[in-house]
Image (cartoon, rainbow, N blue to C red):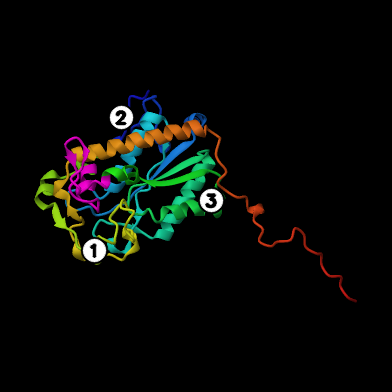
Amino acid sequence: MSSLKPLSERWGKPVLNKFGKKIYLDQMNRKELEERLKETDIVFLPVGSIENHGPFAPLGEDTIIGTSIVERVAYETGVTVAPPIIYGSHPSHHYGLPGTVPIRATTLIEYVSDVIRWLSNAGFKKIIVWNSHGQEYVLPIAKDVAIIEKQVHALIMVTSWWAWVQDLLRKAGTGEEIAPGVKLEKPFIHADEVETSVTWYVAPDLVDVETLKKEGDWGVVRVIPGKWVNAAGNVFPDKPFNWYDVSHLPELYYYPKGFVGWASRADPEKGRVIIETVIKRVIEFVEWLKKTFPPGKVPRTWIDLKDYQYNKPEEGVGPIEQVK
């Protein structure tokens, strides 16, 4: 063991699971990778964003939340976490806010599908694309591009952290508790009570609590009433439009501080209930996946290129004899 200290605590210090082995793919060497694949070929690929979340929360909030969750899952289960994709795709109304770095959807699709392709090439055959930003309408396309155009032979799954606690998020504003003594007062939107509570729990040192309490109320303005348009997370399936189906009011003009709703009502205890529930449920799924599909065993999710018909004959005639 070297007596030298890493130059960067963030990048140079190994992050280990409860079995004493590395969690992150980028910290492994070739030998460690090969050993991991014998144990489990499940990998999480976190996809987040750099986005304005107001004067009290970090720009990398989405990436921080999603990666923190799967790090805990990997700690308990022994699966691998790939380095997160920290830039994300954004709908039109997010554009223009300082600190937000939007990536075109087509660019992100190609990027994510390439990463999937080469994670599969490395030996990971169960790839969970773990979304933590409002781009859940983009990433399933990357899955299909990977399978159809890049001929990836793997089980690829796309999900978002909030999808694992939709039952809790639907209780927001109803007066119903999500845990004894814990209620969500307002529906999940963006950089609001819910998301700020979650960030406060997973990264308490990155939330400016004083500013949050002073400036954390903005409210919500809409073009179409919420009766017809779902909010973030699409947790209300009875509404005809999801939030990304409608061109919303530009945040640059209507939410210039970068947050929506009543973030001042955030509380780390609310975040704890939400995040610990996500972790518990994802661990249950991962353990099922490990047991059902051991390393090297994967359900057929692809079609071989040669099996496409395309109306192609197997053979063609030769050249016509030259007439003299």
The kind of secondary structure element at disc 3 is helix
Q: Are marks 1 and 3 in contact (CB under 8 Å)?
A: no
| One can see residue 8 in this view | no
Relative height, residue 22 to residue 306 (above, below): above
Q: Nearer the viewer, mark 2 or mark 3?
A: 3
Magenta part of the chain: 169-198
Indicate which disc residue 120 carries: none
Relative height, residue 93 to residue 198 (above, below): below
The amino acid at mark 1 is Pro
In the foreground, 157 or 52 = 157
Q: Is residue 175 magenta?
A: yes
- Residue of label 1: 225
Horizontal and vertical percent position of residue 288: 45, 33
* Residue appearing at x 39%, y 46% in the figure: 159
Q: Are marks 2 and 3 in contact (CB under 8 Å)?
A: no
Horizontal and vertical percent position of residue 87: 35, 52
Q: Nearer the viewer, mark 1 or mark 3?
A: 1
Give the class, few, some or many, for how many residues have Cα within 10 Å of label 2's Cα (few <14, many ≥20). Answer: few
Cα distance between the residues tagged 2 and 1: 56 Å
